[in-house]
Image (tube, rainbow, N blue to C red):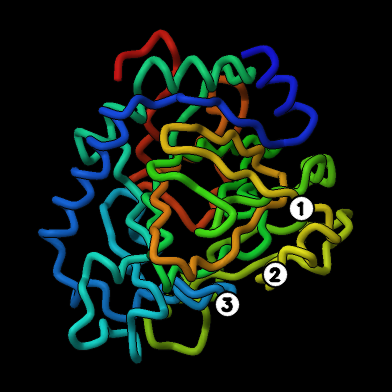
């Protein structure tokens, strides 16, 4: 683990090989299949996860998903925000989030396992808490790209950013089916912008359907902006020219992602899907860290996030 930690400190990305066994991986995939069986696509009308910045998040279905299990559609499976007729619903979902880690027993068991906690503490976290989880499908043939981004943009803390991504491959993630790409060392650039609740929308009683967006990006002062942020890169050559390197991994491998490192992925045009289960955690209040009240993700009634402290039960 020392070598993994060293790589993470240097590059902002590192891989823990064979982190989850076959039984754990298959158990999560089977459980997700059950959740999809019980899902009615009409519930997700208009909640299409688009590459275009913020296009999928202008409705309450998204920004009220912190303590729920909600389903977000692939653009290629929809027409006018509705599932295309005859399209298999299990192949139409982009992701499921954002409360799997505490609402579903199978995903909770993994998310709060001692194994996960030990990795987090090995990276120096003292009071880690877990705001968010996502199951990403990267569907065969229609799986959309992930634009260049920093996770801390969406999960911001003060007085310093502390986000950490735990990206577990549930299927082999290859160069062909849209593996993760990262820009090593870019975590040293700092967080450039934040994705926040728009005060005009939330404080002035706006409702869904108004022209005012619910969620907006805001550049942080004193930080150099990156002209390629929010872009979907189209070729491997361009990605490499920008300093990105691929990170193909096998099912069961865990990718550690620093909250400030730039990462992305290409679309999946192959007949093979690329499922992952992702946790995003931050340092907690016990270490003097505050979850930004303007973050898009907020638990109702100010409830605390689940703890990943080693001395606390799952």
Residue at (65, 42) in percent of width and height: 259
Q: Mark number for residue 52?
A: 3
Q: Which of marks 3 and 1 is nearer the N terminus?
A: 3
Q: Position of residue 42 (x, y in %)?
A: 18, 77
Q: Which of marks 1 and 2 is nearer the N terminus?
A: 2
Mark 3 and mark 1: span between their CA atoms?
A: 21 Å
Q: How crowded is mark 1: few (under 14 residues within 10 Å), some or many (20 or more)?
A: many
Q: Relative to residue 10, is residue 103 drawn left or right?
A: left
Compared to residue 145, the image places residue 132 above or below, namely: above
Q: Which residue is label 1 attached to?
A: 244
Residue for point 14% across, 69% down: 40
Q: Which residue lies furthest to the top in this view?
A: 311
Q: Mark number for residue 233?
A: 2
For the residues labelled 3 and 1, say whether their Cβ atoms are less than 8 Å apart. no
Q: Residue at x 42, y 71 (%)?
A: 141
**Residue name at image x 89 percent, y 54 percent:** 222
Give the secondary structure at mark 2.
Answer: loop
User: As drawn, is 12 to the left or to the right of 131?
Assistant: right
- Residue 62: x and y, percent? 38, 65
Mark sitting earlier along the chain (3/2):
3
- Where residue 238 sits in the image (x, y, percent)? 79, 67
């Amino acid at each position: 683990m020392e070598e993994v930690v060293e790589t993470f400190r240097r590059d902002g990305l590192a891989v823990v090989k064979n982190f989850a066994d076959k039984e754990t991986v298959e158990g999560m995939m089977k459980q997700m299949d059950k959740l999809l069986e019980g899902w009615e696509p009409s519930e997700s009308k208009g909640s299409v996860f688009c590459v275009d910045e913020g296009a999928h998040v202008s409705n309450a279905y998204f920004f009220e998903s912190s303590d729920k299990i909600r389903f977000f559609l692939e653009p290629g499976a929809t027409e006018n925000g509705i599932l295309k007729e005859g399209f298999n619903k299990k192949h139409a979902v982009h992701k499921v989030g954002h409360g799997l880690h505490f609402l579903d027993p199978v995903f909770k068991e993994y998310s709060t396992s001692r194994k996960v906690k030990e990795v987090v503490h090995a990276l120096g976290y003292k009071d880690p808490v877990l705001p968010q989880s996502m199951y990403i499908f990267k569907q065969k043939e229609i799986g959309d790209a992930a634009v260049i981004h920093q996770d801390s943009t969406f999960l911001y803390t003060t007085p310093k950013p502390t986000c950490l991504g735990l990206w577990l491959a549930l299927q082999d993630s290859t160069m062909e089916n849209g593996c993760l790409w990262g820009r090593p060392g870019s975590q040293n650039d700092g967080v450039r912008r934040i994705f926040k609740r728009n005060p005009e929308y939330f404080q002035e009683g706006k409702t869904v359907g108004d022209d005012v967006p619910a969620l907006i990006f805001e550049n942080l002062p004193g930080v150099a902006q990156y002209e390629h942020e929010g872009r979907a890169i189209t070729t491997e050559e361009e990605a490499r020219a920008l300093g990105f390197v691929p990170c193909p991994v096998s099912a069961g491998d865990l990718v550690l992602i620093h909250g400030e490192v730039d990462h992305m992925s290409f679309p999946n045009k192959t007949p093979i899907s690329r499922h992952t289960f992702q946790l995003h955690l931050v340092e907690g209040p016990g270490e003097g860290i505050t979850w930004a009240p303007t973050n898009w993700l907020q638990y109702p009634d100010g409830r605390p996030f689940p703890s990943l402290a080693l001395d606390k039960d799952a």
